[in-house]
Amino acid sequence: MSSKDLYAPKKYVGKKELWMFSLGGLGQGMIYAMMSSYISDYYVNVLHLPLMFVLLLMLLARVWDAINDPIMGIIVDRHETKWGKLKPYILFAAVPVTVLTLLMYSSPSIEGKKLMIFSAIVYVMWGMMYTMADVPFWSIPNVITPNSDERSQVVSFAKIWNSVGSALPEIFFFIFGIVLPKVIDASNPEQYNKNLYRIISVTVVAIGMVLYVNSYFHIKERAVPPPTKKQPGEESTLKRVFTCKPLLLVIAMGILSSGRYMVQAAAIHVARYAFYIGPDYTNMTLEEKTAAISASVSTVKTIFQLCAVVGMFGATLLMPTLMKKFDYKKLLITTCLAGFVASIFTTLIAWFTNNLYICIPFILIQCIPLGVINTISIAMIYDCLDYMELKTGHRDNALGSACQGLINKFGSALSTCGIVVAYWIIKIDPAEMLNSEAIKAATELTRSQNFAMFSLVSLIPGLSMLLCSIPMFFYKLSGENKKKMQEELAAQREARGYSISE
């Protein structure tokens, strides 16, 4: 096979395979969103776990992920099962992720230290098992096609449906938030919210896991790199990562963009403590007040999440076309700076008008980089793996995806930690705001408290997008440099006897 044939002209992935992989990404997106968008609210406002405990749990779990993700990547890269190299992990991870997700929102009848120990064990174990599901799954585009352009199209299309999956738990939250108060007892706010989360988690896992596991049966591994033996004095896998400047720049960009997760992760908190949309509840019974506040929280959160989904999904939907016509680096820098400017307008409008509806167009714009970063960052990591392979002769597919997983989980944790810190700064006691004797709405807080909570989804994400664009000015794997790299890699692969199955 010539170097020319290896890249541009030939397509390997059929429509059915593309759709099944993408729907697997949809299912995975549902399950990850169930954790990343809701766990902070569940721990803080439903289980009433101590704020310091939640903060330390998130930070320490991410420190462990910093070790666990690369280890998983190395394990996957160094071993191959009789069922394949990457696909089998879809099946290996399915049961533990399902069980742990349900346990995470099970609301056990324990309190105090026992509840904290239970929550910590489940949360850490969930992160480990999800790593086993995530790292191999997003490494698969590297092995189903050797064509760099087709690989980018597979990723961008799969990310579209992954974004859809991320939005579905919010739809369930909105529907159940309106319907459940009419069919179950809402006189006890704590128990009502426990039931709400339990029902949503079961629904998400039932749908998401079926779609995720189904992808296993439709994916073919075509471009698995030939095994290479470690030579004496050869640098380690981790050293190859830490000496790859383009990859380090992408990782730095991903970490600095962590604030973008606030738009989704903090939406439920903003809905509780920044806005109230509903009738006057002064003369309502506790059950009626609980129902009114629940409806308001569902409505306000849905507004934010719809903005995030429309902005993010709209951008993701356009990415296959945009990535064909424009340079990844320029796309990322341009959209991030636009998102920063929009966040400034969002913040100013909220401060001077306190009107949520006027903010909506600007929230939409500031959510566009979410879809761009989610898609381009993994495509850039794949390009960095090409660069590493060209320079070292080694292809560390899973380790590259481990870097992406670490970026995502680190960003999610920073968002959660930022939310917890905000509770301290704003001086909000979740146990006082939501308990079985008295439930309070956002209108019972000061305007400064409302605005400070709102900044979690406006100013902070904007500043994060401004910062994350800086490393990209130093990223060189773009334009003619990228084209030249791919041509050299194709020739090198041909010389090494790199074979591709049909």
Image (tube, grey):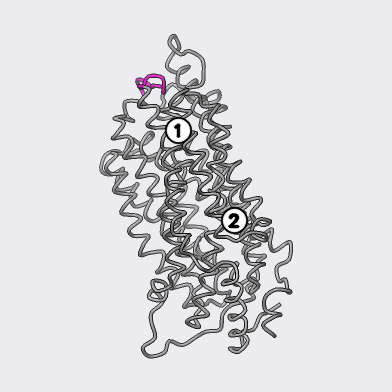
- Measured along the vertical axis of the image, is residue 443 above or below residue 45? above
| Between marks 1 and 2 in the image, the one whose residue lies nearer the viewer | 1
Q: Secondary structure at mark 1?
A: helix
Query: Quick one: quadrant of the C terminus?
Result: bottom right
Q: Is residue 137 left or right of residue 501?
A: left
**Nearer the observer, 455 or 95:** 455
Q: Residue at x 45, y 30 (%)?
A: 348
Report the span colored magenta.
Answer: 434-446
**Residue 44 position by quadrant:** top left
**CA neighbours of label 1 inside 10 A, class few (<14), some (14 to 19), many (20+):** many
Q: How many marks do you count on the picture?
A: 2
**Nearer the observer, 15 or 50:** 15
Q: Position of residue 431 (x, y in %)?
A: 32, 29
Q: Check disc 1 and report the residue beneath it.
A: 347
Q: Position of residue 338 (x, y in %)?
A: 53, 45
Q: Main secondary structure of the magenta part?
A: loop
Q: Earlier in the sequence, mark 1 or mark 2?
A: 2
Q: Residue at x 34, y 54 (%)?
A: 61
Q: Position of residue 393 (x, y in %)?
A: 50, 83
Q: Is residue 282 left or right of residue 141?
A: left
**Residue 24 position by quadrant:** bottom right
Query: Quick one: quadrant of the N terminus?
Result: bottom right
**Residue 436 position by quadrant:** top left
Q: Position of residue 319 (x, y in %)?
A: 64, 54
Q: Residue at x 54, y 48 (%)?
A: 369
- Measured along the vertical axis of the image, is residue 292 above or below residue 196? above
Q: Check disc 2 and report the residue beneath it.
A: 25
Residue at the limit of the structure toward the top, as seen here: 283
Q: Is residue 476 left or right of residue 480?
A: left
Asked if residue 42 lies in the magenta stretch, the reply is no
